[in-house]
Image (tube, grey):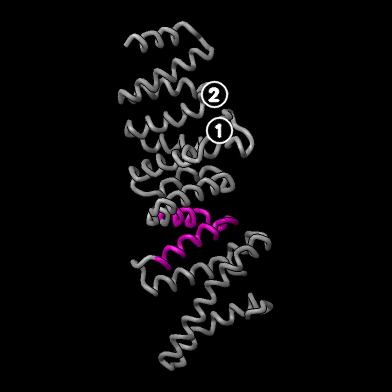
Amino acid sequence: SAVVTQLRKIVELQAEGPHREESHFRLANYAFNAENYSEAITNYQSILKLPHSPLYRAALYKLAWSYYLHGEAEKAIQLLVKQEIDLADPEEGAGPCVIMRTSQEHREPFRLLAYALKTLGNPGHLIRLVNERPALESFPFVTKVANYYESKKRIREMFELVSSWVASHPLYAETPFLHEKMVSYVKQSVQFSIEDVLEARNTYVRTYSPGSAWAAENRSEIADKVKPLLKNHLQFLMTYYYAEGKKTGKISDYALALPWYQRYLSLFSADEDT
């Protein structure tokens, strides 16, 4: 069209400047809408060479969509990781591009991310892509993705994502709080048996109790925040096994409850409800 021709002339004639940036962006949008994703990618990439451009964040997001629709889901995910981790939101401080985003716009990257991860087959791929970053950087982002899945009732995908994080970062301070989402899913889902529930709670207690590798790695202030979760799981385990012993009357069944009572007393003997 005549508009596209004029925009291309501006790009060719102006080495730099706001008109050139806007022309690249508009050319990219025309190409995107025409499903010419390779040309869209080229023009959006031109704007990413200018990190202080007011069009930077919008171009990065549209570039991620272009890669996804062009069949390059992993590149799309890498850009979304960059956007959500490296570019701070305005209310959190700063970033190379300070534009306000609505609540819908905050959710949009996670919608695209979910599409791209589905293309790769498993949300756990995200953990592989963020593993090169410090856990301190990637944990808040992974938590937001898990919360997005949960808000959309996509619980199986949330479970896969969280289980991949727990396997990759077993000693990270905040991991127990994501791990709790996994246990909650096992408790609530009809596809799991009572044996699965017992094992999930048992694993949680063993993994984060005093004396565990996680506890040895982290400060006592963090461990204290995990204690209410441990208490809940221990109360369930000791009550369940005691009730089973009461039903059968067998000493061997009562004996299964004993370790859980002992562990509970060792951790919560000073509590009023003990």
Q: Which residue is mark 2?
A: 54
Using the rendered view, name the quadrant where residue 267 is placed: bottom right
Is residue 167 shown above or below 114? below
Q: Position of residue 104 (x, y in %)?
A: 46, 39
The amino acid marked with disc number 2 is Pro
Task: Determine the main secondary structure of the stretch shown in magenta.
Answer: helix
Residue 134 coordinates in the image, percent (x, y) = 57, 45
SS category of the residue bearing label 2: loop
Q: On the image, which quarter does residue 156 sit in?
A: bottom left
Q: Which residue is mark 1?
A: 100
Whether 79 is drawn above or below 201: the answer is above
Q: Quadrant of the N terminus?
A: top left
Part of the protein shown in magenta: 160-188
Residue 223 in the figure: left or right of residue 18: right
- Check if residue 163 falls in the magenta segment: yes
Residue lying at 53% horizontally and 85% vertically, measured from the top left: 258
Camera-nearest label, 2 or 1:
1
